[in-house]
Image (tube, rainbow, N blue to C red):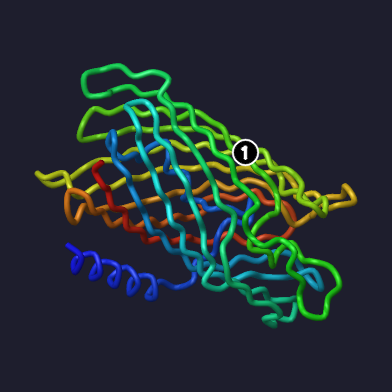
Amino acid sequence: MRSLLVGLVSLLAVALLSIHPALACSVCGCDPAAYTLGLDRPSNGSFRFALEDRVLQKESGTGDDAESERENRILLRAQYAPFHSLVLQAEVPYFTWKRHLNAEGVNDDTAQGFGDATLGARFELFRSGIEARHVLSLLGSLKMPTGANSRVVKGEDAPDEHIQLGTGSWDQTVGLSYTYGPRPWTLFANVQGRLNTANSRGFRYGHALFATAGARRSFLESGRLIGSLEAQLRTAGFDRLSDGSVDPDSGGSVLYSTASVAYALTPDLMMRGIFQVPTATWLHGTQSEHPVAYVALSYDFEM
């Protein structure tokens, strides 16, 4: 089993290196495909560990205010279901590199290290049907300021918010998730709101709202192949500077279309690929939105 895991991790690394840099969400500074807690969960009494990697680029602003970021970030996600109605989750990101480019396209800063860790939970409020045909759950998470937030570009006097590994703020997300499961199908929808606080310099990212609807189906006689399609609308307010003014190149709305394919290599080990495309955008100022690609491995441990 150990040799199998080593081989799969190596395969994941090769797959990630072959992906062209994807451009990520500049609406709210977070992962378009990160909200998995409402749909995916381990079985009761099990731990699930997932390793996810993304390579991305994003840009905003024009003229002297133009800037862009490029990064490779690994995310470790752990989930545990202590009993039937509750799932606990923790996420820890690590940036293998994060580069900032100024208005001339010059790489003026490169960082490496841990980002902001997040704790979350999913609690089932209602369930009916023999095969859990209807499930309504409450979702909640807390992002903690564990990533470096006082970094300064060489030659500058004050920290730049866009070169930090963390936001320096405590941010809360709360929402509802609904699933309907007439096997082999699963229909799902959720809505979540995120409230951001200000960091020590008074900078605050805009509050955000996320709404998702989609369908997932298992294939093959074994059910090990799983495909899904979904639409996600995300909208965020302007980022606010320490003097109370807003960043004109921040916030707005994006409608994403997402496709994912997962295959269970063993009953406990699954590999997943996710591809997300912005199909419509209503952004403030100058911002760019492009496809985002993810590759991930997850493994379940029975207690």
* SS for dot 1: strand
Above or below 99: residue 268 = above
Camera-nearest residue between 236 and 1: 1
Quadrant holding the N terminus:
bottom left
Quadrant holding the C terminus:
top left
Disc 1 residue type (three-letter): Gln
Camera-nearest residue between 217 and 296: 296
Q: Is residue 300 left or right of residue 203?
A: left
Give the residue pinned by disc 1: 172
Instruction: Please name the residue shown 38% across and 70% down the image.
Output: 16
Instruction: Please name the residue shown 36% across and 54% down the image.
Output: 50
Q: Position of residue 75 (x, y in %)?
A: 46, 58
Q: Residue furthest left?
A: 221
Above or below 177: residue 263 = below
Camera-nearest residue between 262 and 89: 89
Q: Is residue 154 left or right of residue 196?
A: right
Camera-nearest residue between 290 and 52: 52
Instruction: Please name the residue shown 41% across and 59% down the image.
Output: 52
Above or below 115: residue 177 = above
Instruction: Please name the residue shown 43% across and 61% down the image.
Output: 293
Q: Position of residue 258 (x, y in %)?
A: 42, 50
Local crowd size for mark 1, using a 10 Å CA cut-off: few (<14), some (14–19), many (≥20): some
